[in-house]
């Protein structure tokens, strides 16, 4: 499991469309790579959890690191995890208030809406970590 944060290089005009592009690509590719996780964009900061086979996660992270849509990438946590927190999410989009707002489930090579969702303890911890990683940085105070 790998958690990082990075500084978004997206302009205010294109941020919604670009985020949708990122999530679309991530969901398609992650399902094929057996990778799951969650992505939060708050203010100008991304925070993301990537889960799955170590080699696949590290290879994907190398690709993500070279993406010009963000910079100042900083790994917050990297450790073997006994189980996935976001096993049903190819890539959850975490809304501003911290909850995944589009619960989607990878089902074979398709994504289907998940049933009513309540975060587990492990998910709460990771969501809190993502929120904290994106709050209060880069504002010069
Ligand atoms: C913040 C951020 C998170 C991303 N997360 C993922 C991800 O989880 N999975 C993924 O495949 N691509 C992700 N991407 C996009 C990749 O950097 C890359 O553009 C995409 O995988 C397409 O790669 P390709 O053009 O080499 O096929 C992310 C990009 C950014 C900026």
Image: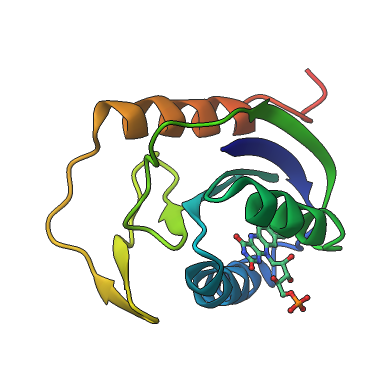
Q: List x then y, in percent, for residue 126.
A: 44, 31
Q: Is residue 37 left or right of residue 60?
A: left
45 versus 114 height, above or below = above
Extreme bottom residue here?
110
Q: Is residue 31 left or right of residue 99?
A: right
118 versus 122 height, above or below = below
Residue at 65% x, 57% y: name it: 56
Q: Nearer the viewer, residue 12 or 118?
A: 118
Residue at 54% x, 67% y: name it: 30
95 versus 27 height, above or below = above
Residue at 45% x, 45% y: name it: 96
Name which quarter of the figure residue 11 lies in: bottom right
Residue at 59% x, 76% y: name it: 25
Number of marks in picture: 0
| Screen quadrant of the C terminus | top right
Q: Nearer the viewer, residue 102 or 36?
A: 36
């Amino acid at each position: 499991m790998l958690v990082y944060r990075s500084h978004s290089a997206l302009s205010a005009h294109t941020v919604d469309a670009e985020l949708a592009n990122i999530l679309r690509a991530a969901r398609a590719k992650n399902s094929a790579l057996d990778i799951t996780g969650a992505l939060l964009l708050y203010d100008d900061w991304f925070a993301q959890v990537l889960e799955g086979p170590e080699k696949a996660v590290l290879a994907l992270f190398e690709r993500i690191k070279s993406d010009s849509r963000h910079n100042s990438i900083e790994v917050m946590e990297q450790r073997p995890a006994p189980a996935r927190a976001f096993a049903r999410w190819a890539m959850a989009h975490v809304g501003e208030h911290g909850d995944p707002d589009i619960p989607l489930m990878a089902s074979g090579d398709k994504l289907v809406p998940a049933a009513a969702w309540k975060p587990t303890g492990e998910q709460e911890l990771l969501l809190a970590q993502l929120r904290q990683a994106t709050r209060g940085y880069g504002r010069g105070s």
